[in-house]
Amino acid sequence: MSVPRVEVTPAAEALLRKMQGLHGPLLFHQSGGCCDGSAPMCFPRGDFRVGQEDVYLGDIVRTPFYMSGPQFELWRHTHLTVDVVPGRGSGFSVEAPEGVRFLIRSRLFTDDEYRALEQEGPPLKGPQH
């Protein structure tokens, strides 16, 4: 992918590596659901079933990042950066016991970035790992 759709801050990368050491291979999923809104949830890879309509946005630190299809339609123009902040997020995400939570920071793609992404075609859907 020439233009990344998702990236990670150094702090989130360090936490993600720690979580990988504790839980093994992980995945992120962002649904835009009711519990933590647009907070990304991080799960052990075998504990979450990626749906056929989930959109694969790329990998961060060897961890695939997926977004629900309907959420992606709303966020398709948006670059995502996974960060970490103090505070308790969802009890289902692996970082919850650490007293921190993953968080999405976003910005719109530039016109050039968006044109490049459009030329690549739509992102893949369904499980990629």
Image (cartoon, rainbow, N blue to C red):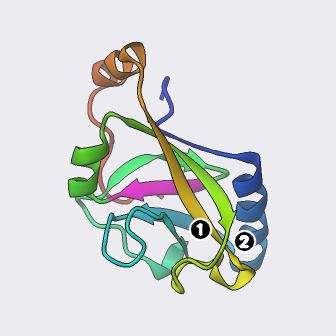
Q: Which residues are magenta?
A: 63-67
Q: Amino acid at mark 1?
A: Leu
- Is the magenta region chiefly helix, strand or loop? strand
N-term-proximal mark, 1 vs 2? 2
Looking at this view, is 123 or 37 the one in front? 37
Looking at this view, is 51 or 13 the one in front? 13
Tell me the tag on residue 26.
1
Q: Secondary structure at mark 2?
A: helix
Residue 60, percent across and down?
61, 49
Q: Amino acid at mark 2?
A: Met
Answer above or below: position of 51 versus 78. Answer: below
Residue 99 located within the stretch drawn in magenta:
no
**Is mark 1 in CB contact (under 8 Å) with mark 2?**
yes
Mark 2: give few (<14), some (14-19) or many (20+) Cα within 10 Å: some
Query: In the image as oriented, which residue stretches furthest toward the top?
Result: 112
Q: Residue at x 25, y 61 (%)?
A: 52
Looking at this view, is 4 or 89 the one in front? 89
